[in-house]
């Protein structure tokens, strides 16, 4: 059932930009609890940039980088060659 839902999500995202499709796929690829600790902030030529809330979650997500890249590519229907994780900066203006 989960694979069926992932396929349906991918088809429903077809009208969005690649970055928006990946942002929507993020929650499904990670699961809601984990996805709340990172946000897709960019996409260029196969590389997804994800901003992560803290160093502990950065390490956790980095350990799953390959699996997440494959799942996001499959769900969003977008080429993902790599995910770059970066720590969120609290002092942004």
Image (spheres, rainbow, N blue to C red):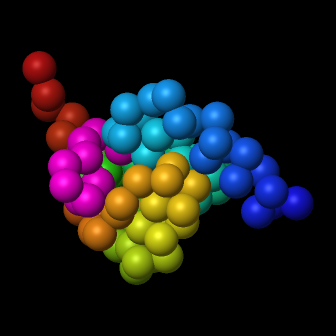
Prevailing SS of the magenta stretch: strand
Q: Is residue 93 left or right of residue 63?
A: left
Q: Is residue 44 visible?
A: yes
Q: Is residue 55 visible?
A: no
Residue 73 is one of the magenta-drawn residues: no
The quadrant of the rendering that contains the C terminus is top left
Q: Is residue 73 left or right of residue 29?
A: left
Residue at the (25%, 46%) spot, across then down: 43
Q: Position of residue 41 (x, y in %)?
A: 28, 40
The quadrant of the rendering that contains the N terminus is bottom right
Residue at the (14%, 31%) spot, across then down: 91
Say which quarter of the image contains residue 92. top left
Residue 46 is one of the magenta-drawn residues: yes
Q: Position of residue 83 (x, y in %)?
A: 30, 64
Say which quarter of the image contains residue 20. top left
Say if 59 sits above or below 28 in the image: below
Residue at the (41%, 78%) spot, across then down: 66
Q: Is residue 31 left or right of residue 26?
A: right
Say if 48 sits above or below 11 in the image: below
Q: Is residue 92 left or right of residue 42?
A: left
Say if 3 sits above or below 27 in the image: below
Say if 30 sits above or below 42 in the image: below
Q: Position of residue 34 (x, y in %)?
A: 56, 56
Q: Which residues are magenta?
A: 40-48
């Amino acid at each position: 059932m989960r694979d069926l839902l992932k396929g349906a999500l991918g088809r429903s995202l077809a009208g969005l930009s690649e970055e928006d499709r990946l942002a929507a796929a993020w929650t499904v690829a990670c699961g809601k609890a984990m996805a709340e600790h990172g946000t897709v902030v960019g996409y260029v030529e196969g590389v997804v940039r994800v901003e992560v809330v803290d160093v502990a979650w950065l390490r956790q997500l980095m350990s799953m980088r390959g699996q997440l890249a494959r799942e996001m590519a499959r769900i969003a229907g977008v080429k993902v060659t790599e995910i770059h994780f970066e720590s969120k900066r609290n002092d942004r203006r």
